[in-house]
Image (cartoon, rainbow, N blue to C red):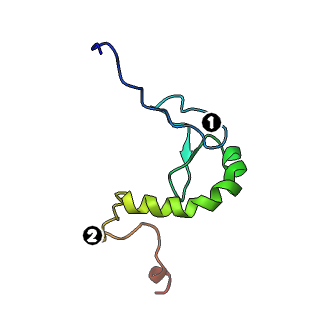
Amino acid sequence: MSSSEAGPAPALPTCAKCSKPESNEDEPVLKPCISCKSVQYCSRDCKKADTKAHKKVCASLAQEYMKTADIKMASKQAPTKDAHRGGLQKWQFDT
């Protein structure tokens, strides 16, 4: 092997329905399934067309995703010092 030979190029993600490849990594066109995040679609029409087939495996894929995903919960923040939002408040009308 010479140093000019490169390994296989990383596969670009493709649409699960029509197999359309991701055209540009900087501007992703494919959107993941909201539940399982494992399958990607290029359009709403492809997502709708594949729903019947994908629905059967989506729950199990979602469980696998939740096992391996690094999900960070939002931290509780103290309310701001000045919680007044501006405008008239209810108590101002009652006096």
Q: Which residue is mark 1?
A: 19
User: Is residue 77 depicted above or below 8 in this figure?
Assistant: below
Q: Using residue 43 as the reference point, say whether residue 36 is left or right of it.
A: left
Residue at 56%, 52% in the rendered image: 33
User: Is residue 79 depicted above or below 65 in this figure?
Assistant: below
Instruction: First in sequence, mark 2 or 1: give its number.
Output: 1
Q: Where does residue 47 sit, x and y in percent of width and height?
A: 66, 49
Residue at 39%, 62% in the rendered image: 67
User: Is residue 3 depicted above or below 86 in this figure?
Assistant: above
Q: Where does residue 53 sit, x and y in percent of width and height?
A: 68, 55
Q: Where does residue 35 sit, x and y in percent of width and height?
A: 54, 59
Element on which disc 1 rests: loop
Q: Determine which quarter of the picture holds residue 57.
A: bottom right
Q: Using residue 80 as the reference point, say whether residue 21 is left or right of it.
A: right
Q: Determine which quarter of the picture holds residue 30.
A: top right
Element on which disc 2 rests: loop
Q: Using residue 74 as the reference point, say whether residue 26 is left or right of it.
A: right
Mark 1: give few (<14), some (14-19) or many (20+) Cα within 10 Å. Answer: few
Q: Which residue is mark 2?
A: 81
Residue at 63%, 61% in the rendered image: 56
User: Is residue 6 depicted above or below 63 in this figure?
Assistant: above
Residue at 50%, 61% in the rendered image: 62
Q: Which mark is residue 4?
A: none
Residue depth check, mark 2 versus mark 1: number of the one nearer the observer: 1
Q: Where does residue 11 sit, x and y in percent of width and height?
A: 47, 32
Give the residue type that dot 1 points to: Ser
Mark 2: give few (<14), some (14-19) or many (20+) Cα within 10 Å. Answer: few
Q: Determine which quarter of the picture holds residue 68.
A: bottom left
